[in-house]
Image (spheres, grey):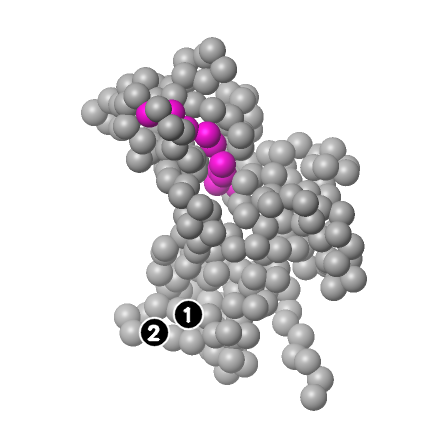
Amino acid sequence: MQRQKTSVSQEDYLKAIWEMLEQDQTPISARLAEELGVTPPAVNAALKRMARDSYVRFARGGGIGLTKKGRQVAQRLALRHQLAEMLLTDVIGLSWARAHDEAERLEHAISPEIETLLLKRFGSRSACPHGVPLQGGMAKLRQQGAVLLADLRAGESAEIVCVYEKDGKFLEFLDGLKLRPATRVEVKRREYDETMTLRSAGKTIHLGKPATSRIWVKRLAA
């Protein structure tokens, strides 16, 4: 039997659903419409087609889940996205902040042969430039003991292991502060409004909750 080929649109839907599940969010039509920049009727029509093709399933309350086949497609696309980011940053020299957006376009064009070669080239790397584990995603990151910077208390020190990569302006902001994976930070103060005062590489940095809730860290022993 000939293997069913997914379209670029279907791949975008499946990866978006997978990423929401990775972040402990419940995928629903409204969230998908916002994430993909399409209308709710378009989302509903696409999901019905993908359910018919056994890529997704519907849960009670309007939630959307992935079948085994749908999850495999999403995970393969996520891996190719990460490999594209590595190619762009390590080989071509594209900035860390722009790699995600460019990889969104390249991920669909990577063939199985190119995927194998890229894995061979970057196989020793355990994560993408933004710190997401190569195979396992955010679930693996949490299994490895990562927590949000926002969860740290005053006096705790940690090493940044991953940052939210979908917002190029946020990445440029972090780059300007030299806050990237492998950077060590110490929480000096937590304010009532959850603003944090950090110390990193001899500099004092102030970050609000919108930033600290998108930075993953591993606590360091006192």
On the image, the x and y values in percent for residue 122 come to: 71, 46
Numbered badge on residue 65? 1
**Could you tell me which secondary element the residue under label 2 belongs to?**
loop
Amino acid of disc 2: Ala
Q: Residue at x 34, y 74 (%)?
A: 59
Mark 2 to mark 1 CA distance (whole Å): 7 Å
212 sits left or right of 116 in the view: left
The amino acid type of the residue labelled 1 equals Gly
Question: Does 15 appear above or below 165?
Answer: below
Q: Which residues are magenta?
A: 156-165
Q: Which residue is mark 2?
A: 59
Toward which corner of the image does residue 125 lie, by quadrant? top right
CB atoms at circles 2 and 1 under 8 Å apart?
A: yes
Q: Residue furthest bottom?
A: 1
Relative to residue 102, is residue 191 drawn left or right? left
19 above or below 160?
A: below
Question: 124 or 10, which lies in front?
Answer: 124
Principal secondary structure, stretch drawn in magenta: strand
Residue 27 belongs to magenta span: no
Residue 84 visible in the snapshot = no
Would residue 170 be seen by someone viewing this image from the given angle?
yes
